[in-house]
Amino acid sequence: MTGRVTQIIRHPIKSHGREDIAQVRLTAGCTLPGDRIWAVAHEQSTVDGSRWAPCQNFTRGSKVEGLGAMQATLDAAFERVALEHPLLGKLDLNPDTEGQKLIDWTRPLIPENRAASARVVRAQEQGFTDSDFPSITLCNHASHRAVEQRIGHPLSIYRWRGNFWFDGLAPWEEFDWIDREVRIGTAIVIPRERTDRCLATHNNPDTGKRDANVLGALDSWGHRDFSVRAEVVQAGEISVGDGIGRA
């Protein structure tokens, strides 16, 4: 059975904005191009970007709910990122050389009891995904609808901060793909693990406010997982509308 890709989403700066794109070329052993190239290290972190580091080192949505409402546009050619937030307005910057602009711009969002943002770091080996291997995330609309039914009202898919969204398959079918080849467009990936979730899923992507107990809804299935993290094993092109299913 084959589903269809409905959206492709990247996040140039980890936890700081999202961007829909129509197509992408995946490379074996790499993350989604343009996804989590940069991250914002907080004042208690020693991360410099030379190697992958876990999310605890960064300013992120589970600690700063207001970040959830940010949108981004990556100019890959010039390596600039344009950001927009309903409370902060707009910001355009080169994260490699103008990171302080982002730190100053987002300062009003940081709670007083949280570590302050300190510097923007660029990933030199792999994108700053939440897995210790270069991964992309595959998200199932049917599973999302199951969560909506538990919550009792519609939820934006942007809460999940995933890369590839697909429809046409059964709820939670993606969990059966672990360690099996999956074809997306002309690429082949192997999901390696389920994606464990945190409080960032409670953040409304329009307002940046926490307004839904998504983790509580997931608890009703006996887990707090949504989507799967996959390794790209065969390069290929993927466009919105392409098929996805077991290879």
Image (spheres, rainbow, N blue to C red):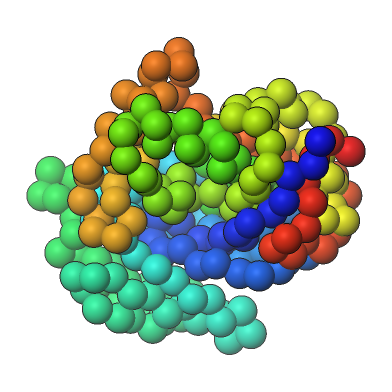
Q: Is residue 147 above or below residue 35?
A: above
- Residue 146 can be seen in this image: yes
Compared across the picture, whether 90 is left or right of 29 comes to left
The answer to whether residue 223 is left or right of residue 8 is left
Residue situated in front as seen by the camera: 86 or 117: 86
Quadrant of residue 89 within the rendered picture:
bottom left
Classify 209 as above or below 147: below
Q: Nearer the viewer, residue 216 or 104?
A: 216
* Vertical arrangement, residue 188 with respect to residue 83, above or below: above
- The x, y position of residue 33, in whole percent, is 67, 64
> Could you tell me which quadrant the N terminus lies in?
top right
Q: Nearer the viewer, residue 79 or 100?
A: 79
Q: Residue at x 60, y 40 (%)?
A: 140
Q: Tell me which residue sits at (19%, 70%) in the image.
A: 87
Residue 65 percent location from the top left of the image: 25, 49
Q: Residue at x 33, y 81 (%)?
A: 91
Name above or below for residue 243 compared with residue 75: above
